[in-house]
Image: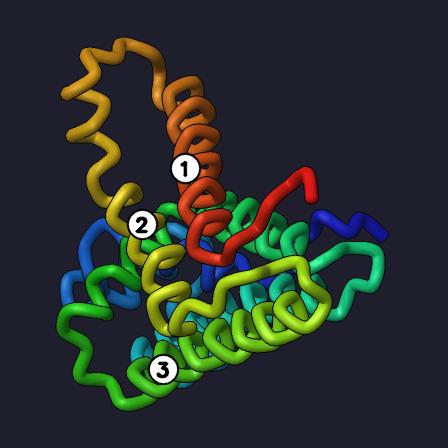
Amino acid sequence: MNTNMISKEENILFAAEKLFAEKGFEGTSTREIAKMANVNISMISYYFGSKEKLYEKLVEYRMNEGQFFSRDIVERTDLNEWQKIEKIIDQFSNRIRTQKCFYRIMQREQLHTDNPQIVEFLKATKMSFLSMYTRILESGLKSGVFTKNPPIYLLHSTISGTLFYAFNAKEMYKEFLNDTDDENTFDEKYYTELNKHIKHLLKDLLGYEENK
């Protein structure tokens, strides 16, 4: 069986994701989603019940993916605490870069969601990252990999805040740099520099020295 094959539900979710990113939740109709997914409109009701439920399912699906990669890194025994931090930054940054549609939706939701389910998902995700950073920091302090103990919420906001601001401001920075590369080439340079910059900040915040 081809592992790249996506299910009918995922096909509808991914079509909806593109439209929600482009037009917002209110501006997207189930008819448009059905057309983009190339399915009968009744399939949306069958799988999800309503546009609201489809939207919630999309957020849950993407959030769960993110939680999974984070948990996987924390549990690894072949990496020290600094290497875990590096991996998390690389993976987080890569997700923002490759899942532009979803993160565009999330930016909008951060500002003005009134869906209690989405509010809960967003909060649970942030709390999960906070507890993950706490575990890594405590363990790194104990093992001597880190020598400083910054407030965990500042660690979280330094990583997420920098990544999301850079994600939003990318086109402006491209213009500022007079960069004429195509989007993929610019993305490659941009996110490589961004990751390096965040790691420099965190080395200082955590008191991590490479050649101890």
Q: Whole-percent x and y of residue 34?
A: 38, 60
- Per the model, the C-alpha gap separating discs 2 and 3 is 19 Å
For mark 2, give the secondary structure: helix
Q: Residues within 10 Å of mark 3 (few under 14, many from 20)?
A: few
**Quadrant, the C terminus:** top right
Give the image location of residue 104, x and y in percent.
28, 53
Residue at (52, 57) in percent of width and height? 11
N-terminal of the pair, mark 2 or mark 3, is 3
Q: Which mark is residue 162?
A: 2
Would you say residue 158 is visible in this rendering?
Answer: yes
Q: Determine crowd level at label 1: few under 14, some 14-19, many 20+ residues with C-alpha closer than 10 A.
A: few
Q: Is residue 34 left or right of residue 93?
A: left
Using the rendered image of the protein, determine whether residue 42 is visible from the camera's viewpoint. no
Q: Secondary structure at mark 3?
A: helix
Residue at label 1? 197
Image coords of residue 81 (percent x, y): 67, 60
Locate residue 154 relative to residue 40 in the image: left or right. left
Q: To which residue does mark 3 refer? A: 123
- The residue closer to the viewer here, 205 or 110, is 205
